[in-house]
Amino acid sequence: MFAYAPATHEDMERWRREDKKEILRAMEHSKALWAGDVVVSSEDGRILFNCPFLRLEENYYSCTIYEDRPNTCRKFKPGSSELCSQFKKQN
C-alpha cells in the first residue's frame, strides 16, 4: 500500500515557476496534511493511502512525475517511514 506524500511550500513554488498545472491541480485537490509520520485529509482527518502520481504497470508501481516529484519523495529511503510500510526493515 502506498501513501500520498504532500508537497512542501518549496515544491509548490517550483511547480508554479515551471508551470506544472496538472501537478498543482492534483496537489490542491488532495487537501493532504502531515500528521506525524502519516498523511491525513484536512477535511475529515482520515489517513490517506493513495498517490495520484503512482501507476501500476504490470507488477510494479511507477511515479508519473518522477523528474518533478516532491522533495519528500526525493529524500525518502525505503524502510525509513510509516509512509511506505511495505519496505519496513525485517527483524
Image (cartoon, rainbow, N blue to C red):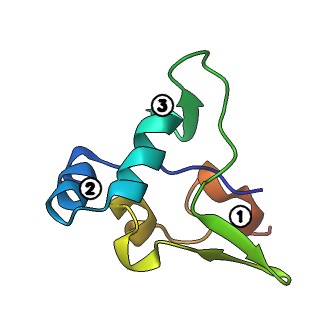
Instruction: Give, as a three-letter code, the residue at label 2.
Output: Asp
As shown in the figure, which amino acid type bears the numbered disc 3? Lys
Image position, residue 82 (x, y; %) = 63, 50
The residue drawn where x is 48% and y is 47% is 26
Q: Position of residue 85 (x, y in %)?
A: 72, 57
User: Which residue was labeled with disc 3?
Assistant: 31
First of labels 1, 3 by sequence position: 3
Query: Which residue ends up furthest to the bottom in the rendered image?
Result: 58
Q: For the point 71% across and 68% down, which residue is it?
A: 87
Residue extending farthest to the right is 59
| Crowd tier of the residue under label 1, counting other residues whose Cα lies within 10 Å: few below 14, some 14–19, many 20 or above | few
**What amino acid is labelled 1 in the image?**
Lys
Q: Secondary structure at mark 3?
A: loop
Q: Is residue 73 visible?
A: yes
Q: Quadrant of the C terminus?
A: bottom right
Q: Nearer the viewer, mark 1 or mark 3?
A: 3
**Residue closest to the eye, 36 or 44:** 44
Disc 1 element: loop
Q: Are marks 2 and 1 in contact (CB under 8 Å)?
A: no
Separation of marks 2 and 3 at Cα, in angstroms: 15 Å
Q: Which residue is mark 2?
A: 11
Residue placed most toward the observer, 86 or 17: 17
Which residue bears the numbered disc 1?
88
**Is the N terminus in the top left, top right, bottom left or bottom right quadrant?**
bottom right
Tell me if mark 2 has few (under 14), some (14-19) or many (20+) residues whose alpha carbon lies within 10 angstroms of its own.
Answer: some
Question: Which of label 2 and label 1 is nearer to you?
Answer: 2
Q: Is residue 36 visible?
A: no
Q: CA distance from mark 1 to mark 3?
A: 27 Å
Q: Secondary structure at mark 2?
A: helix
Above or below: residue 82 compared with residue 91: above
